[in-house]
Image (cartoon, rainbow, N blue to C red):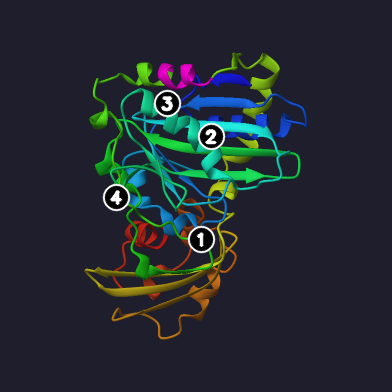
Amino acid sequence: MYYIEGRSHDPTFNLAMEEYLYRSVEPGHPGYFLLWQNEPSIIVGRFQNTAQEVNRTFAEEHRIHIVRRISGGGAVYHDLGNLNYTFIVPNDDGNPFDFARHALPIVNALEKLGVKAEFNSRNDLAIDGKKFSGSAQHMDRKRLLHHGTLLFDSDLSVLARALNVDDEKFTSKGFKSVRSRVTNILPHLPVPLSMGGFIAALRNSLSGTEARSLSNEETKAIMTLRKEKYSTWEWNWGESPEFSERKVRRFPWGKVEALLDVKKGLIGQVRFFGDFFGLESREALERMFTGCPYRADDIKKRLADFPLEEYFRGVDREEFCEFLAG
């Protein structure tokens, strides 16, 4: 098995790297073991509604990346206190979704470091009942990708806030994350380690691996995949399942309730209610949003030359755009 240690902290590059290497594995390939880190990021599951999983305002204020991965499961928070591991192997054992098999090397490595970890019924790794690792898989008939997080010394307060979304705002057909009590590995180590030491310990715990680096050709192909897929709004937000969202805000000029139906990242319908003053007929305003991508720049463009004051007397255009797109 080849071992590759990630050199980039860019989540769009790292997820593109995973997919590129996954595509390259054929029957008989020795497979890959990867260790890699991301700067602050929220990584959303393949079948999730991004808007329902992410505290968008908090993420934007703290410059947290939001990226969708190719595997299912729930949303997770990454920072440089978190280490990610990936196994990419031929899918030739006839036992799909065997999470325990790929988690066992992590459990064994932690045991050597003096930490007793357990694999639970939700496919998570835990210490004293508190989760420190979640995992997910993606596969086809040829190959399998298993990856997971390892909370080593992550900022758990940011994790909680970045993934804190008001569930009452949404009705979604996407898979919703289940929140768990979490912990870091570092406080449980009998002898403290740096992140570099922890990476080395995991690397050395696997026998039969051969270290190698990405070639220039591989890096170039990964960068192309990053640009065309993982850096795009269409993948990270537009791939979300159909959902409905309710937004409510009290402005100085009145209270507004907006009900939005969104499919494939496009607004299908929006309705406005409240105690504001304006034209009785709202149809022109509501029709104007039909087919608009559900992102701030596009909403602002739609409203740029629209007489919004006629519908919401006293409205501040920038404030209203932030409310609708936030």
* Identity, as a three-letter code, of the amino acid under mark 4: Arg
Q: Which residue is mark 3?
A: 109
Tell me, for residue 12, which label it has, or none: 2
Q: CA distance from mark 1 to mark 4?
A: 20 Å
Q: Which residue is mark 1?
A: 175
Tell me, for residue 181, which label it has, or none: 4
| Disc 1 crowd, CA 10 A, few/some/many (<14, 14-19, 20+) | some
Relative image position of residue 169 (x, y in whole percent): 37, 68
**Residue 312 appears in the rendering:** no
* Chief SS of the magenta region: helix
Q: Are marks 1 and 3 in contact (CB under 8 Å)?
A: no
**Residue 36 appears in the rendering:** yes
Residue that sits furthest to the right in the current view = 27
Nearer to us in this view, 210 or 114: 114
Q: Are marks 2 and 4 in contact (CB under 8 Å)?
A: no
In this picture, residue 286 sits left or right of residue 150: right
Q: Which residues are magenta?
A: 200-206
The residue at 34%/58% (across/down) is: 165
Q: CA distance from mark 2 to mark 4?
A: 27 Å
Residue 137 vertical placement versus 186 (above, below): below
